[in-house]
Amino acid sequence: MNFRTNIHLKKEENQIDYASKLLLIGSCFSENISKKLAYCKFDVASNPFGILFNPKAIETLILNSLNEKTYTEKDIFYLNERWHCFDAHSDLSSADKNELISNLNSAIKSTHKSIHDSTHIIITLGTSWIYRFIETNAIVGNCHKVPQKMFAKELLSVQEIVASLENICQSISKVNPTATVIFTVSPVRHIKDGFVENSLSKAHLITAIHETLKVVSGKYFPSYEIMMDDLRDYRFYSTDMIHPNETAVDYIWEQFKYIWIQANTFSMMKEVDSIQKGLAHKPFNENSEQHQQFLKDLQQKITSLKNNFNIAF
């Protein structure tokens, strides 16, 4: 008997290898995948403006980057002894106003370059719910604990999300027509919005992505469906019963790896993993002859990967 409903995935074309350049943008689940890719030493840039949850915030980042927007003091505000920007996650916030502005503009420049250079752009959508700052009528990427009465909460319609995603894809295609855009929906449930509201939000995202892919070039990776339909058990959740735990993330990563990473790259990934474990190894006696030989062998492996495949540690 089979006690699980496995999702059977087919390998995609234009797969990822060590010559690929990757840009990941979106919700916290994109952070999990980017960490896996970075551990394996792929060329990856992840969330230059921090975690972004809704399609409009991601669209804003991409358009601002392509237009090389320059952030100034008028784009930031001071609250709770820190400077913030509504376009960015609080990870970029700073006690120093000039530091925040500098970091925002550096992120714009790096994202501009990544969009032009990337072979694969992975966009993870988290929610259809958005917050509109009443004073300016602008949709924000992060509220930064500004009082909720300052915002109007809205649910983006499927049509609004489609328009946003089409704009994202078309804008990327104009400057980088060979880039593969991969959409996915975060398996993290936003139950603070409410259980029914979260289901509605995810349904809008999934419907909008598939409507978008009818008219623009792109792909869909079913991370949400894998979590909801394949890993349907609370043993796959962290203690908050909302976020996927390490086992679930590893499983979804293996599914992503199977369909999106070239099979002939796996042996090199295994070698990188061996080096990573070696670098993390803590010896009983770091001055012993055995450990010194271990370090020498490890360095030879690192040098070989650097010289032969341009993989740097």
Image (tube, helix red, strand yellow):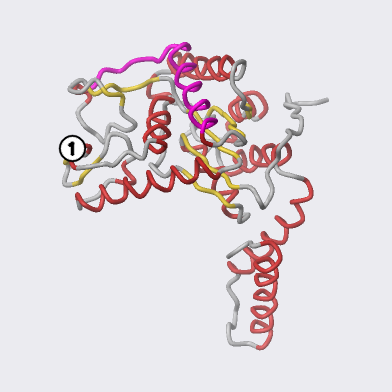
Q: Which residues are magenta?
A: 151-174
Residue that appears at 28% across and 51% down: 102
Residue 49: image location, x then y, percent: 38, 42
Residue that appears at 32% across and 33% down: 142
Residue 186: image location, x then y, percent: 52, 30
Residue lying furthest right in this view? 1
Residue 165: image location, x then y, percent: 49, 22
Quadrant assignment for the N terminus: top right
Q: How many marks?
A: 1
Residue that appears at 31% across and 23% down: 131
- Left or right? Give the position of 311 relative to 164: right
The residue nearer to you, when weighing 238 against 208, is 208
Does residue 167 show up magenta in the picture? yes
- Left or right? Give the position of 23 relative to 94: right
Q: Which residue is mark 1?
A: 74
Q: Is residue 179 above or below residue 55?
A: below
Residue 29: image location, x then y, percent: 51, 37
Does residue 222 show up magenta in the picture? no
Q: Is residue 93 above or below residue 209?
A: below
- Residue 10 image-quadrant placement: top right
- Residue 277 image-quadrant placement: bottom right
- Residue 245 image-quadrant placement: top right
The residue nearer to you, when weighing 169 against 16, is 169
The amino acid sitting under disc 1 is Lys
- Magenta stretch mostly in which secondary structure? helix
Q: Secondary structure at mark 1?
A: helix
Q: Is residue 106 above or below residue 295?
A: above
Q: Is residue 171 above or below residue 203?
A: below
The residue nearer to you, when weighing 295 against 287, is 295
